[in-house]
Image: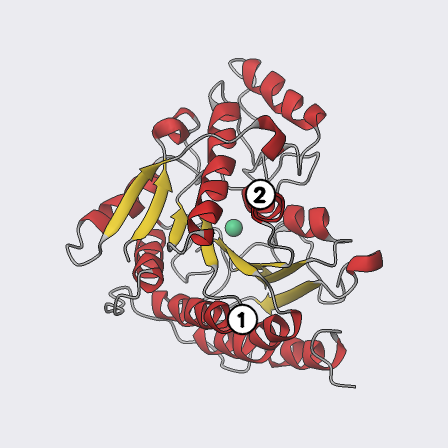
Amino acid sequence: MPTILYTSTQHTAHTHQHPEHAGRIDAILTAIAADPTCAVTIADIQSVSDVTIERVHPSSHRAWVLAQAEAANVAPQLDGDTYILPGTAKAAHIAASGACNAVDAMVHGNPACALVRPPGHHATATTAMGFCFYNNVAIAARHAQATHGLRRIAIVDIDVHHGNGTADIFAADPDILYISSHGWPLYPGSGAREHMGTDAGFGSTLNIPMPAQSGDQSFMQAYRDVVVPALDRFVPDAILLSAGFDAHWDDPLGNCRLSVDGYLDICTLIKDAAVRLCQGRWCAVLEGGYSLRALAACTHGLVRLMGNLPRISDRLGSKPSDPHRADAVINWLVHNHPLLRTV
Ligand SMILES: [Zn+2]
């Protein structure tokens, strides 16, 4: 079954001389279009209601984004990292909509990937930051619960940065498991291994801070020994992939050494978990990734994986790294995280 790629030209209204620019989506679509064996369906994103956004963000935050965007002709820089333009509010709404569209497709048994920007995982319920305005994957998770009756959702965030927004939104929610592997130390500085959620949500946050320069073997070990057992213990009704590809060795903003093959190995573990635990319900929502060639190759590979197509060779190759670089954090989590410890 061809993977459905949800995309829209609306994102081009939010672009700037900045690592997070419209050429990122173009690079992905160009790589996929150049592969005649990669059957996909490209679908125009259908806008969701304001209510759908407001399951995560209060109306005051939406109003703030709209007002900032309207004023953006004179103040394009929202903070040190995040630019805003007149088209940003609409682009962000469409990005969140694409994530919800992917959930809808997933529920109907279709492999689906939301090729959206601006990304979302740094946006908290009330704060735009880190290139993000609305938290696309969080909105999609609430949409899956509210519209499709899926109760327990696992979000696996493979972006090199900790998704502080997603973690914050769901910190106290026992029905949403947020798992993040991220370079450490790195922006935004959150995501310590000791942070496991709050109140009733204690144990439903799993942070895996990967030491800088961690590569394929360390990530594979972390996913095999930590992520997969946690998913097995949590038993989700669906898995949403926060698909950031800036942990690739070629990324200018990242600090890790994953290769395309390394990324696809961990994505394969997540897919296998979805098949084993929740009737194959998983879908992907694009987050970061700022090396255009690595972003395109990783996303292309993910789309093939979702469509059950054989993997093609990793033309970018790999970088050497210490296979034991993440041993300490993996060992600590195995013995201390409530989803993992056996006693
Ligand atoms: Zn990132």
**What amino acid does circle 2 point to?**
Thr
* Residue 332 percent across, percent down from the top left: 71, 79
What residue do we see at 36% from left, 52% from top? Answer: 295
What residue do we see at 76% from left, 77% from top? Answer: 336
Q: How many marks?
A: 2
Instruction: First in sequence, mark 1 or 2: give its number.
Output: 2
Q: Residue furthest bottom?
A: 343
Indicate the quadrant containing the C terminus: top left, top right, bottom left or bottom right. Answer: bottom right
Q: 317 or 121: nearer the eye?
A: 121
Q: Determine contact: label 1, label 2, CB under 8 Å.
A: no
Question: Is label 1 in a helix, a strand or a loop?
Answer: helix
Disc 1: CA contacts within 10 A as few (<14), some (14-19) or many (>=20) = some
Q: Is residue 28 above or below residue 38?
A: above
Is residue 320 rendered to the left or right of residue 142?
A: left
What residue do we see at 28% from left, 54% from top? Answer: 2
Indicate the quadrant containing the N terminus: top left, top right, bottom left or bottom right. Answer: bottom left
What residue do we see at 53% from left, 22% from top? Answer: 76
- Residue behind label 2 places its C-beta within 8 angstroms of ligand 1: no
* Residue 175 percent across, percent down from the top left: 70, 58
Per the image, the residue denoted by label 2 is 147
Q: Is residue 127 above or below residue 62?
A: below
Residue 277: mark: 1
Q: 205 or 290: nearer the eye?
A: 205
- Name the image quarter holding residue 157: bottom right
Q: Is residue 91 above or below residue 203?
A: above
**What amino acid does circle 1 point to?**
Leu
Question: Is label 2 in a helix, a strand or a loop?
Answer: helix
